[in-house]
Image: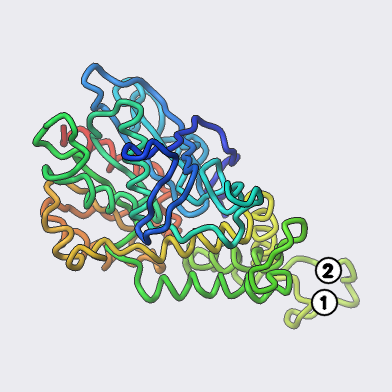
Amino acid sequence: MDDEYGEMTSEGSIYKHVCSRTGRSQFTLESGCVLEDAELRYQTWGRLNQTKDNVLVVCHALTGNASLHAWWGDLLGPNLPFDTSKYFVISANILGSCYGSTSPQSIHPQTGSVYGNDFPDISVQDTVRLQLKMLKSIGVRGVKCVVGGSFGGMQCVEYAAQAGTSANPWNLDGSSSPFVRSVIPIGCGAAHTGWQIAISEVQRQAIYADPLWNHGNIDPNNPPLNGLSVARQIAMVSYRTQKGYEEKFGRRTRKSSSETPTTPSLAYGSETKWEIKSYLKYQGKKFLSRFDPVTYVKLTEQMDSHDVGRNRGGKKVALSSVEIPALVLGIDSDVLYPLNEQKELVELLPQGTLGVIRSDAGHDGFLLEQDQVGRYIKDFLEKNH
């Protein structure tokens, strides 16, 4: 099966938040907790125009980073959907992620040790609010569109709620136009459902079941990597489809080293070398080189926080005031974020329209079907100035 990501690094510039009221490096979270020395890692492509509003914000998914070229590279460049000859394109690493932004692997300023499980609970609302502050800090006066899939799509929905109305706190220059002028959320809904929370929780339980989790008291030099590997394997099943797995793997097996023409290996049992078993083990092992267990737990919990209606009177009320065009894309084979959720999101957004990506790849179609995704994005951007 195709891989979703290229080389993953922590490259980019750093935005360090400073509270305008106190002058201190403090960011107050939705929970009321204060995160000190909050930083975001981000990357940019292209140039700001004179009015500083030719901006495309591209949000990454659960295990992504700010290196847009590593996961949507076919969409980035001159005359491509993210046209760097026309737009100033920016992608920021999620707050709490391990690719350069403040995360469980950062140093707690009060203790001098890594946060680990003491890292505070972050919500999608927090992540987007800090990104908006970052955009203002680098001189952005308006955003043409925010685009993202999966966890990135959840951020798009939050951008619409926070900055997609004329009555929003980001228009500091007195403009009556929304700070964000359009959004393209892909493969998500208005809130994380019980189905999605359950799948996240099973992955977390795999990590908790590793003895090295030790009730969250992890030895940084000996973390629960076996649990993280299993969690990733569970995720890889939810991202794809029955048809995709059947066509790629079916019941095929690999030959055992002990197999001979006279003593063939059994086609069942614990020693059977299913090709799908080898694939999942490979994916689990590969993931360990680029993620850590605590960050994975915290980020899946942040995804579970997604509910655009929280403290806003419910999702219908929250999105009814959004004044901007929204292209909602869904994948017809997605079992993790099924198409009915995108249909609901279109109904909730006053200027929402639906686009359907045809794919057998399931949820990962938002990354793997770049031709289809790119055509939708390019057409939408051309129609919505």
Q: Is residue 334 left or right of residue 216?
A: left
Residue at the disc numbered 2: 256
Q: Is residue 303 left or right of residue 285?
A: left
Please tell me which residue is depicted at 31% across the width and 21% down the height of the picture.
Answer: 48
Q: Amino acid at mark 1?
A: Ser
Q: Picture coordinates of residue 341 (x, y %)?
A: 27, 66
Q: Picture coordinates of residue 177 (x, y %)?
A: 11, 36
Residue placed most toward the observer, 94 or 366 = 94
Q: Secondary structure at mark 1?
A: loop
Q: Residues within 10 Å of mark 1 (few under 14, many from 20)?
A: some
Label 1 near label 2: C-beta < 8 Å? yes
Q: CA–CA distance between discs 2 and 1?
A: 7 Å
Numbered tag placed on residue 265 in the rendering: 1
Q: Amino acid at mark 2?
A: Ser
Q: Residues within 10 Å of mark 2 (few under 14, many from 20)?
A: few
Question: In the current view of this chain or complex, which residue is farthest to the bottom?
Answer: 269
Please tell me which residue is depicted at 70% across the width and 65% down the height of the picture.
Answer: 224
